[in-house]
Amino acid sequence: MQPILDVQRMTMDFGGLRAVDSVDLQVHPDEIVALIGPNGAGKTTFFNCITGIYVPTAGDIYVLTRNKEKKRINGYKPNKVTELGMARTFQNIRLFPNMTVLENVMIGRHPRTRSWILGAIFRPKSTRQEEQEIIDYSYHLLQKVGLEKYVNELAMNLPYGAQRRLEIARAMATEPVLLLLDEPAAGMNPQETAELKELIQQIRDEEKIAILLIEHDMKLVMNISDVVYVMEYGRLLARGTPEEIKENPQVIKAYLGEDHDA
């Protein structure tokens, strides 16, 4: 089975600093894959490279598109990466705070809309129909993530955990084949984290969307992941099942040494 994401020997330099050093990573259909490591390991830089925010210094990034076509996406802009089937959330919440919950999700439909500026001006029947389809689909996603009761609420008024789920719903609105979550449990209380765990598993099981996440909550990572990759100082330290990673002496050392290294 071909991987949805196939990263080969990817390297990212910033001047004389090598933030990511020849990292290989794969995500296959229906997998939940975690990327973990101490602070400063290069995890978010890795995400920024594969989603088009940075152009890697070296290596190859291949995506299996929605049409089952393998494409090398080095240098693609973030919007083009999204169109090909990869959507992400960010470590710091990036909602539109003064727009409603529904409107935030509707914005995520932009890569899948067909109407152009003339349609917006003259509003033929096809444009009006598409607008209703966007509203209906967006509301459906809010139901999926348990936010339908907030549909007309401003995003900034949502509880923190609900804002995180709204970001996920907006990413899902692009109809991705791979969803990338950058520290989705950051700042959540135990109840919110438990709800997030159920949501991530639901997205994989019911929507058939593969997931790659960066996360510091090791209990969450070990409970939901099929494969775990560990980075340290920009390099890949280990890869394996959660059970294998738990017993890996190099990983244990990296995490035990995190406070000292900081």
Image: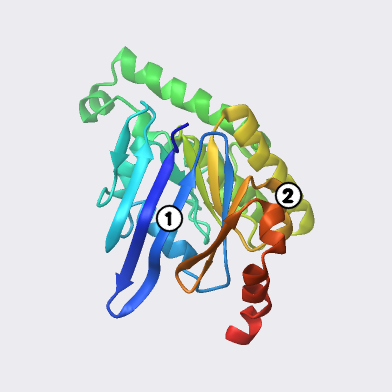
Estimate the x, y position of residue 88 in percent, counting from the top left: 47, 48
Circle nearer the N terminus (2, 1): 1
Is 255 drawn above or below residue 155 in the view shown?
below
The residue at the far left in this view is 118
* Residue drawn at the location 28% of the way across and 25% of the way down: 115
Which residue has dot 1 on it? 24
243 horizontally vs 41: left or right:
right
Q: Residues within 10 Å of mark 2 (few under 14, many from 20)?
A: few
* Residue drawn at the location 64% of the way across and 42% of the way down: 200
Q: Secondary structure at mark 2?
A: helix
Is 170 drawn above or below residue 53 in the view shown?
above
The residue at the far right in this view is 191
The label on residue 223 is 2
Location of the C terminus (image quadrant)? bottom right
Q: Amino acid at mark 2?
A: Asn
Label 2 to label 1: alpha-carbon separation = 23 Å
Estimate the x, y position of residue 205 in percent, counting from the top left: 64, 31
Q: Specify the quadrant of the image occupied by residue 143.
A: top right
